[in-house]
Image (cartoon, rainbow, N blue to C red):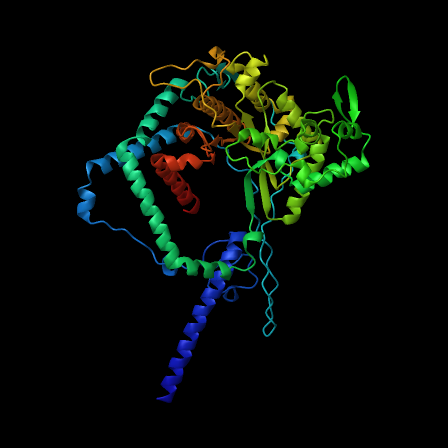
Amino acid sequence: NEEDFKMRVEAEGQSKAATLDKIYFTARSRSRNSIHKGAGSGASLSPRIQSQDSAEIPIYPTLDPEEQFQRIIIDPPESARRDMDSDTASACRSIDRALSLRDKYQSIVAVAPPPPGGEPATPPPTASRQPGEAEESEPFYRREAPSYDPFLSTAVPTASEHIVEMVDGVYHVFEPGASAPMLSVPNVAQFYVDYFALRGIVNSGPVKTFAYRRLQILEERFSLHVMLNGHKEGQEQKSVPHRDFYNVRKVDTHVHHSACMNQKHLLRFIKSKLKKDPDEIVTFRDGRFLTLTEVFDSLHLTAYDLSVDTLDMHAHNTFHRFDRFNLKYNPAGQSKLREIFMKTDNLLAGQYLAEITKEVIADLEASKYQLAEWRVSIYGRKLSEWDKLARWFFVNKLANPCIRWLIQVPRLYHIYKRSGEVQNFQDMISNIFAPLYEVTRDPSSNMHLHVFLQTVVGFDSVDDESKPEPIQPQPGQAMPLPSEWTSHENPPYSYWTYYMYANLATLNAMRASRGLNTFEFRPHCGEAGDVDHLTSCYLAASKINHGILLRKSAGLQVSAYVICAHLWYESYA
C-alpha cells in the first residue's frame, strides 16, 4: 500500500545517507588522523553523534582496504607446497640463513628510544554548536611541535666511571669493576667468515634462479595491481583534503651540506659580500693576508663577471666521474673560493658558510614541509677535527627542527698515510672515535661536541666505489689488524665497513646506557664498483645510500626486499 511504499523509500534514503556519511567522514579522517593520532576507540561514524563537550578528538574509521581494492592472491595447491623441488627448498633455506646473518649483526646495535614529550597533548574541547546554527568547517587538530633547542638543555649528564679501551681496532667499554665489556661485537675474523658465507649464498645457482623468478612475480603483481586499482588510488588521493605533493612533509636524506644551497642562492650571497664587505680579510696566502676584493682580483673576476654559468657548480656530466663531481664544489673552478665560502675551518672560522646556512634554514622553515639531513665531513686526520666542527655549529647556533646532521667519513687513509698525517689505520680510527667516547663518558669535557651530537643521526662512509682495490680479502686468509695496517694502500671496502660498524655499535651501547641519542650506520654503497660492497653492508649497515647495483644480485635484492617488507609490517602493525 501507499504507507508501506513511503516507509521503503524513507529507509532507502537513510541507507544512502548513511553510506555517503561514511564515505565523507572516512575521507576527512585520513587527513585528520595523519595529523593527529588520537584519543581512543569507540568513535562513531559522524562527529555530530559524539558529545560536544568531550575533550576527546574524534577518530574516524577508515574503510577496510579489502573492500576498496581488488586483490591478487596466488594460492598454490597443497601438493605444490608438499612436493617442493629440492632447488626451491634449498634456496628458501639459504635466504633464511642470509636473514639470520643480518640479524646477528643488527640485533646488537643499540638504538635509544625517542625522547619523551613527542606525543601531542589532547587539544581543548571545541565550543558546542547551538541547534539551528550554521555548521562551520571543522578545524584540523594539529600536533604541537615538540620543543627542539639543544642549546637550552641544562641537564648535562655527570661524568661516568666507564673504562674505554681499544682492542684490535675496536673500542670496548667496561662498567666500573667489570671484567667483561658492556657489549661484545663479532671480531673481524668472524665478520669475514660470515661475509664469505653470505657471498656464497647470494651467488649460488638455486638462490639466483629462485630470486629472479620471485622478483618477476612481484613486478607482475604490482603491474596488475596498478591496472586494476590505479584509478581507485587516484580517487582516494583526491578525496584527502589539503594534501598534495607540495604540502606533505618530505625529508631529503642525501644532501651534502656544502651543496645545500642552489647556485642562484650562492651567487647572490657572493655578490652581496663583494658589495657589502669587500675589505674584509678572508684568507692568508703567500705570507700575507688578503681581503675579499684582493682574492677576486687575483682570480681576474669581478661581481659583474659572476653568473650561474661562471660558477659552474651544477652536477652536469658527473655520472661515474667522481673526480668531476668533487670539482663541482669549487665556485668558478677555484679552490680559493671553496675555502672561503664553503669550509667550516678557515681564517673566518666558517662565518660565511654559517651565514648562508642560516639563510637556507630560513627558506626551509618558510616552505614548512621540507626537512633535510645535511652531511658534514670528519676526515680522521687529527683529533681536533671534532672540536672545530662542533665549535662552528655551537657558536653559530645551527640547530633547527627542520635539520639533522649526518657525519660522512671519506675513505682516504692512503692519502693521509703518504702525507705522514697517520702512521697506520688505527690512528684514523682513534681520530674518528676517541673524542666521541670521551664526550659520552664526560659531556662537560666538551659541551660544544655534546650539544652537536644531539643533532647527529648517523654516520656515512664515502669515496669513489669504482676505484680498484689492490688488497682484497680472501677466504681463510687473515687480514692485518688496524695497528698492523701500515701499507700505503687503502684498506678494502669491507674492512672499512666492519670497523665503522663495530665502533659505532659499542659507542651506541655506551650512549644508550647513559640516556643519550644513538647513531645509525648508513654508508654509500652499491653506486658503482664491486657488488660485494653490498654484501658487507647487508651485514653491517642499518641502511645504505644508492644501492643501484642491487639489480646485479637477485639474491641480495630479494633479501633486502624481505627486510623492507618486515620493517613496513612492523611500522603498520
Q: Which of the pair 1/507 is nearer the observer? A: 507
Task: Give the total of numbered labels.
Answer: 0
Residue 545 place in picture, x, y as percent: 49, 35
Q: Which of the pair 472/438 is nearer the observer? A: 472
Horizontally, residue 493 falls left or right of residue 427, namely left
Residue 568 place in picture, x, y as percent: 42, 44
Q: Residue at x 69, y 41 (%)?
A: 265
Where the N terminus falls, by quadrant?
A: bottom left
* Residue 364 higher or lower than 324, as above or below: below
Q: Is residue 540 visible?
A: yes
* Residue 539 higher or lower than 180, as above or below: below
Residue 569 place in picture, x, y as percent: 40, 45
Q: Residue at x 43, y 69 (%)?
A: 19
Q: Residue at x 36, y 18 (%)?
A: 474
Horizontally, residue 291 falls left or right of residue 407, namely right
Q: Quadrant of residue 314?
A: top right
Q: Which of the pair 159/190 is nearer the observer? A: 190
Horizontally, residue 500 falls left or right of residue 444, namely left
Residue 37 place in picture, x, y as percent: 51, 51
Q: Is residue 156 visible?
A: no
Q: Quadrant of residue 441?
A: top right
Q: Which of the pair 226/65 is nearer the observer? A: 226
Looking at this rendering, what residue extends furthest in the bottom direction?
A: 1
Looking at this rendering, what residue extends furthest in the right direction?
A: 279
* Residue 241 higher or lower than 183, as above or below: below
